[in-house]
Image: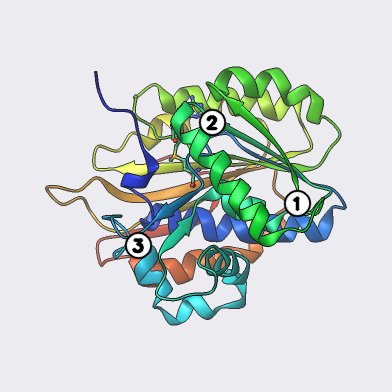
């Protein structure tokens, strides 16, 4: 049997850098616009990771953390969550994943829906968020959490109806282990965007050495009517032993005024990670 994806093996790579810096900015920005916010993380994984044994850390977040760009106010929401998880000690010892970042940024009146396929990851996540709650929240000041164990392609469409009329953000961050995952995620996003028209959707995707991202772009373009933007960063042409050579985010139904604010995040990350054979793009979804 093949081993299941475990995020600890890739934590802190340039994919996390793009996803988490943009996500933290968007959550902070949506909070200023809405009295109450839903945040859904369909592929939550474990929550907080020790970075001592994270092989991709040094070439990813480690590089960003020691750069001048890390001081930019645009990165402050993300940077503050990382510092809080380390009790403000540097050098860093641990790193928060997307559910921990969201938990620390949301307010008592907000709702957090966290899904994960693997039981062991979900149990770790519950433990991590309990610890964060004890450290950083007074009674009743933390956002309400709803946990879901199982395949998000089943539970998301079943509960999306109940979010109708409410503003919120969904992050989908699948591991893309099967070629069919690229189409499956587009089908689910299509269902969610119809059932929850007020929802703003974010999808992370990889450019692996054997790049199948075109399957996702084609499916999204055929299925989804709402405006779709793309932030794409390819750091280099693949080397012999490469795995992840780039990544991107698709944004569905996010106000253009907010999208325009995040261009400098891509520019800053490109200046840190992109090698001479790489490229980056931010604009409406572009087919290859
Ligand atoms: C890339 S990791 C998520 C990392 C996390 N979003 C972060 O940024 O910290 C992907 C996670 O999705 C889980 N997963 C895979 N297929 C899933 C599915 N169909 N439904 C829900 N979770 C799934 C995996 O077990 C894994 O923990």
> How is this picture coloured?
rainbow
Residue 224 shows in this picture:
no
Q: Residues within 10 Å of mark 2 (few under 14, many from 20)?
A: many
Cα separation between marks 2 and 3: 28 Å
In this figure, which residue is indicated by the disc labeled 2? 220
Q: Secondary structure at mark 1?
A: loop
Q: Residues within 10 Å of mark 3 (few under 14, many from 20)?
A: many
Q: Earlier in the sequence, mark 3 or mark 1?
A: 3
Q: Relative to 264, is 114 above or below?
A: above
Image position of 59 (left or right of 78): left
Q: Relative to 8, is 4 above or below?
A: above
Q: Are the residues at dot 3 and dot 1 in contact (C-beta closer than 8 Å)?
A: no
In this figure, which residue is indicated by the disc labeled 3? 60
Q: Are the residues at dot 2 and dot 3 in contact (C-beta closer than 8 Å)?
A: no
The image position of residue 84, as x and y in percent, is 58, 67
Residue positioned most to the left: 240
Cα separation between marks 3 and 1: 30 Å
Depth check, front residue: 261 or 7: 7
Q: Are the residues at dot 2 and dot 1 in contact (C-beta closer than 8 Å)?
A: no
Q: Quadrant of the C terminus?
A: top left
């Amino acid at each position: 049997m093949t081993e299941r994806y475990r995020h600890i093996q890739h934590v802190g790579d340039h994919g996390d850098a793009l996803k988490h810096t943009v996500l933290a900015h968007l959550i902070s920005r949506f909070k200023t616009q809405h009295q109450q916010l839903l945040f859904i993380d369909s592929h939550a994984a474990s929550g907080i990771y020790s970075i001592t044994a994270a092989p991709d850390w040094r070439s990813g977040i480690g590089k960003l953390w020691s750069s001048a760009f890390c001081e930019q106010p645009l990165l402050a929401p993300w940077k503050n969550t990382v510092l809080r998880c380390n009790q403000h000690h540097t050098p860093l010892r641990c790193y928060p994943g997307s559910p921990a970042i969201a938990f620390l940024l949301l307010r008592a009146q907000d709702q957090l829906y966290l899904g994960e396929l693997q039981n062991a990851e979900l149990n770790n996540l519950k433990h991590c968020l309990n610890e964060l709650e004890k450290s950083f929240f007074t009674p009743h000041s933390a956002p309400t959490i709803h946990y879901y164990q199982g395949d998000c392609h089943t539970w998301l469409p079943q509960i999306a109806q109940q979010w109708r009329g409410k503003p919120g953000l969904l992050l989908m961050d699948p591991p893309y282990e099967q070629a069919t995952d690229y189409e499956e995620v587009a089908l689910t996003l299509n269902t969610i965007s119809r059932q929850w028209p007020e929802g703003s959707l974010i999808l992370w995707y990889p450019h692996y050495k054997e790049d199948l991202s075109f399957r996702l772009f084609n499916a999204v373009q055929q299925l989804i009517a709402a405006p779709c933007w793309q932030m794409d960063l390819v750091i280099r042409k693949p080397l012999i032993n490469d795995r992840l050579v780039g990544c991107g985010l698709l944004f569905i139904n996010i106000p253009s005024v907010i999208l325009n604010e995040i261009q400098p995040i891509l520019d800053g990350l490109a200046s840190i990670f992109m090698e001479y054979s790489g490229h980056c793009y931010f604009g409406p979804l572009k087919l290859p």
